[in-house]
Every structure is written in structure tokens, then in C-alpha cells.
Image (cartoon, rainbow, N blue to C red):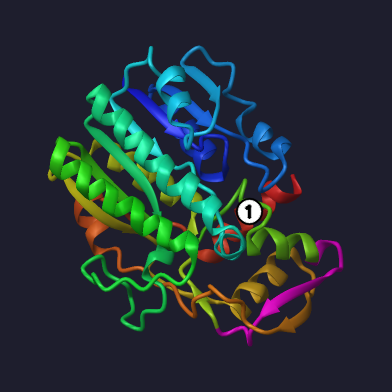
């Protein structure tokens, strides 16, 4: 039974990943600090079905606290670290750049130090498509080394990738940075567009559309992302890799709203305002590398995924 440390395990992606790992008979130690970015009870609901299992240890704590990590986790042994914990969101990071630096960069450094001291040789890091910033060379490939992040959140994810390269080189830790592209599906965070828009449509409240609706996103269904992460825990062919996990197709903001209207069978009330600082016009993943290294394949098309999201949202 593999022993895995999963940070951010009560969140949207983390809790879904935890369930998949438990199906694969892993022993999980889950760390989450129940950051107040959204209500604690949402995260508690995410983990209620597995938190009491004998193969799960749940520890509430903050990864940016170096002393806490060393004391709280000292007695555990791990084969893999899956590091998903982070302050999330592009726009909020503009208001709190120091807080994002503290959690996302210092927290990652703390965990890499923990891995070094405990001789943990597999480290999987949740990065983000936001690291590409404004980049017209679409679809985005990992070989494009000229990254142009335009938000503090994105810059912290670049920093995490670079720290991983340092620790991989110096301390022989296999480090895989997985760049997630706009993940959606059941349990999606309430601050994200699909969740917010669905709620507004059902409540006959206006949707705030930033810009003219032509911005595009590579929406990736949660189960596809989780399959990619699980595959990364088994990867052993090289010591450092950066890998896109996306859907390899784009949906415009207007198209996304249209599909929500169709699936929820209600028209949206749309309030158009100016584009927001930190937002990029397009995200679009080349997933060739993920296919080659992780046998990854995005299986869920957008409308399918929205139907599954609706079943969870209404149910």
C-alpha cells in the first residue's frame, strides 16, 4: 500500500483525487488548512465520505508554517507527495500578492525541504495554465520557455516549478509539475465561472460577463485531470518534467454560457463589463507530452461534463 501525502486534499480537485487514490488502495495523509477563500463547510462536505476511513489520516494545518510541517508530519513515512494546496485565483492574488507568495512559494519550499529531509523521491506539483500568461503561440506547449505570467498567482506557480527543478537537480527528487487547464465538474469551487453562472441562471440573477464573450478557455473535466495526476505518481522515466493537463480544445465565454443555458434549460441574464486585470484572452493546451509520458487522454467533452456538473449541482 503506497503512502501518499496529499496537500489541499479537502478542495475540489484534492478531494476527488483522494477518492481515486483510495480506490487504488493507497494510504493517504491529507493536509488542508480550510482557507477562508470559500466556506469551510463546502470542503467538509467534500471529504465527509472518506475522512473516517482507517487508511486516511487528516491533519488540519498550514504548509507555510515550517515548524508545523516538521512537527505534525515527523512521525509519518511517505512514498509520494502530491502538492495541490495553494491560495487559488488570479483576481484575488492581485489584491493579496504577499499572501499568495507566503502560501504558494514558501509552502512549496517547505514541502520540498520536508521531502529532502525525509528522503521522499516522488513529488507531484499542481501548477497552472496561467503560467503562460499572454502568449499567442497556441496551443501552448511545455517547450515554450518564454513564460509571461500576468498575475501574482501565476508567478507563484512559475516559482514552484523552478524550485522543483532546483531540488530535483541537487537532491535527486523526481519532480513533476502538472499545468492544469481550467478544471470543472462536480465540487467545482463556488468562485469559478461555471459554478457562479449556473447558480445565477437558476436564481434568475444576472451573470457578469467580462469583455465581449470572445475569451477562450481550455476547459478540462475533473476526472480527466485526476487520471493524469494518478498517472504522474507512477512516472519514473526522468527526474524533472513540466506537463500540460488540458482538453486540447477551446470554448469561448459566449459558447460556455450558451451550453449552460441549454443544459440547465434556462436563459441567462447577462451583464457585460470591462475585462479584468490578470485575465488572459485564451488558454489552450497542447497535450502531446502528457499522452506520451502519462498515457493521458481527455475523454470528456464540454457538454458531457456540464451535464455531469448539473447532476451534482442540482442533486
* 208 drawn magenta: yes
Residue under the point 41% across and 70% down: 149
Q: Quadrant of the N terminus?
A: top left
Q: Nearer the viewer, residue 272 or 69?
A: 69
Q: Nearer the viewer, residue 275 or 24?
A: 275
Query: Where 68 sits versus 258, above or below?
Result: above
Query: Where 222 sits versus 78, above or below?
Result: below
Furthest residue to the bottom?
A: 212
Q: Residues within 10 Å of mark 1 (few under 14, many from 20)?
A: many
Image x and y of residue 11, in percent = 57, 41
Image x and y of residue 181, in percent = 44, 61
Q: Judging from the image, what secondary structure is the residue with disc 1 in?
A: helix
Q: Quadrant of residue 285?
A: bottom left
Provide the residue span drawn in magenta: 201-214
Query: Where 290 sits versus 141, above or below?
Result: above
Q: Quadrant of the C terminus?
A: top right
Residue under the point 61% across and 77% down: 276
Residue under the point 79% across and 70% down: 266
Q: Which residue is mark 1?
A: 309
Q: Nearer the viewer, residue 305 or 233?
A: 233
Query: Where 74 sits versus 259, above or below?
Result: above
In the image, is 42 to the left or to the right of 63?
right
Image x and y of residue 172, in percent = 14, 36
Amino acid at each position: 500500500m503506497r503512502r501518499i501525502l496529499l496537500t489541499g486534499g479537502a478542495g475540489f480537485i484534492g478531494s476527488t483525487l483522494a477518492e481515486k487514490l483510495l480506490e487504488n488502495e493507497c494510504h493517504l495523509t491529507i493536509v488542508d488548512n480550510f482557507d477562508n477563500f470559500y466556506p469551510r463547510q463546502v470542503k467538509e462536505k467534500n471529504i465527509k465520505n472518506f475522512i473516517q476511513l482507517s487508511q486516511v489520516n487528516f491533519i488540519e494545518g498550514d504548509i507555510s508554517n515550517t515548524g508545523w510541517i516538521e512537527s505534525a508530519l515527523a512521525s509519518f513515512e511517505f512514498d509520494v507527495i502530491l502538492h495541490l494546496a495553494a491560495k487559488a485565483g488570479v483576481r484575488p492574488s492581485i489584491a493579496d500578492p504577499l499572501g499568495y507568495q507566503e502560501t504558494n512559494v514558501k509552502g512549496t519550499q517547505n514541502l520540498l525541504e520536508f521531502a529532502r529531509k525525509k528522503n521522499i523521491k516522488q513529488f507531484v506539483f499542481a501548477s497552472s495554465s496561467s503560467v503562460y500568461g499572454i502568449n499567442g503561440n497556441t496551443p501552448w506547449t511545455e517547450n515554450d520557455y518564454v513564460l509571461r505570467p500576468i498575475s501574482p498567482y501565476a508567478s507563484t506557480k512559475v516559482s514552484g516549478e523552478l524550485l522543483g527543478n532546483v531540488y530535483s537537480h541537487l537532491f535527486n527528487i523526481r519532480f513533476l509539475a502538472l499545468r492544469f487547464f481550467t478544471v470543472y465538474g462536480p465540487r467545482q469551487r463556488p468562485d469559478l465561472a461555471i459554478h457562479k453562472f449556473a447558480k445565477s441562471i437558476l436564481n434568475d440573477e444576472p451573470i457578469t460577463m467580462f469583455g465581449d464573450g470572445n475569451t477562450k478557455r481550455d476547459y478540462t473535466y475533473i476526472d480527466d485531470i485526476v487520471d493524469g495526476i494518478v498517472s504522474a505518481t507512477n512516472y519514473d522515466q526522468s527526474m524533472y518534467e513540466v506537463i500540460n493537463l488540458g482538453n486540447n480544445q477551446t470554448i469561448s465565454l459566449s459558447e460556455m454560457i450558451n451550453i449552460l443555458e441549454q443544459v440547465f434549460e434556462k436563459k441567462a441574464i447577462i451583464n457585460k463589463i470591462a475585462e479584468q486585470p490578470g485575465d488572459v484572452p485564451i488558454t489552450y493546451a497542447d497535450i502531446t507530452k502528457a499522452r506520451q509520458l502519462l498515457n493521458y487522454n481527455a475523454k470528456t467533452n464540454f457538454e458531457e461534463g456540464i451535464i455531469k456538473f448539473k447532476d451534482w449541482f442540482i442533486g
